[in-house]
Amino acid sequence: MLSDTTAFVTGASGGIGGEIAVTLADRGANVALAARGDGIHETADLIGDDDRTLPVETDVTDEAQVSAAVEETVETFGGLDCLVNNAGIAGPVQPVHRVDLESFMYTQEVNVAGPMLCVKHAASALRESDRGSVVNVGSIGGKRPYPNRSAYAASKMALVGLTRTLAYELGRDDVTVNTVLPGPVQGERIERALAKQQALADVEDAEPLSIGENDFALPDYLIDPADVAEQVAYLAGPHARKITGQEIGVDAGGAPY
């Protein structure tokens, strides 16, 4: 389905990003693995094909690094067909009156400016592809209230707006742009976030967020990273060429609008 294509995946050192990278490679794509740290090499080992993987250590908030990583990808594989903006951070878990501006703004820098920079430097190569696509990984926090997560929710809502705008900007060259919105994903990250929420029980004017099956259409509401990766692979594939400017939930019905 993705043979003879090249994907650039940010946040590919593990978790959802690692799963996405492995899934795209399994479908036949060459994959550039972009993230900070050594985890990208572990993901490359999971894929197990040095000729079709390119680990490129990249901080998505550093424009020079982003530009160099995209350029190396295009030079190595001869082009670029799919950009997956998965890199992101959780940001502060605090009621708004306890959030400091620096942490709020850094969350926007990683979660919004990072994808923008990646699209900025990948746009030329994507336009030259006959099946160019951008898939942003957002969150249901971009559609529903996330108490004590103002920085994160603001960033994910901004990503929705960025996606819709870029769909029009790049669509004239047949590049599709969509956002996948996962619900709570199985793993350490959701466990850490919920633990931080519960730690707010004694904080003045803070009501900890709790989630349960009554918040979702499906009782089994924790999302497997593989389910997110499958949706990304579909949007990168040939059968999704008329899907663009959309937010697609993989969220067990947690944000049904």
Image (cartoon, grey):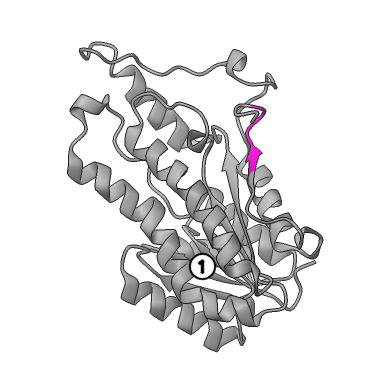
Decide whether residue 8 is among the magenta residues: no
Q: Decide: few, some or many residues near mark 1? Use Cα within 10 Å; few <14, some 14-19, many ≥20.
A: many
Q: Which residue is mark 1?
A: 33
Which residues fall within the magenta stretch? 248-253
Q: Nearer the viewer, residue 46 or 228?
A: 228
| In-image side of 94 versus 130 (left or right) | left
**Residue 237 horizontal/vertical position (percent):** 75, 63
Q: Which image quarter is the N terminus in?
A: bottom right
Task: Tell me the residue at 47%/49% (across/down).
Answer: 159
Looking at the rendering, in which quadrant would you find the C terminus?
Answer: top right
Numbered disc total: 1
Q: Is residue 99 above or below residue 119?
A: above
Q: Could you say whether the residue bearing mark 1 is in a helix, strand or loop?
A: strand
Amino acid, disc 1 = Leu
Q: Is residue 120 left or right of residue 172?
A: left
What residue is shown at x 33% (from left), y 14% (from top)? 207
Residue 97 screen position, x and y as percent: 20, 25
Q: Can you give x and y, in whole percent of width and height, for residue 66 in the image? A: 39, 72
Give the quadrant of residue 50.
bottom right
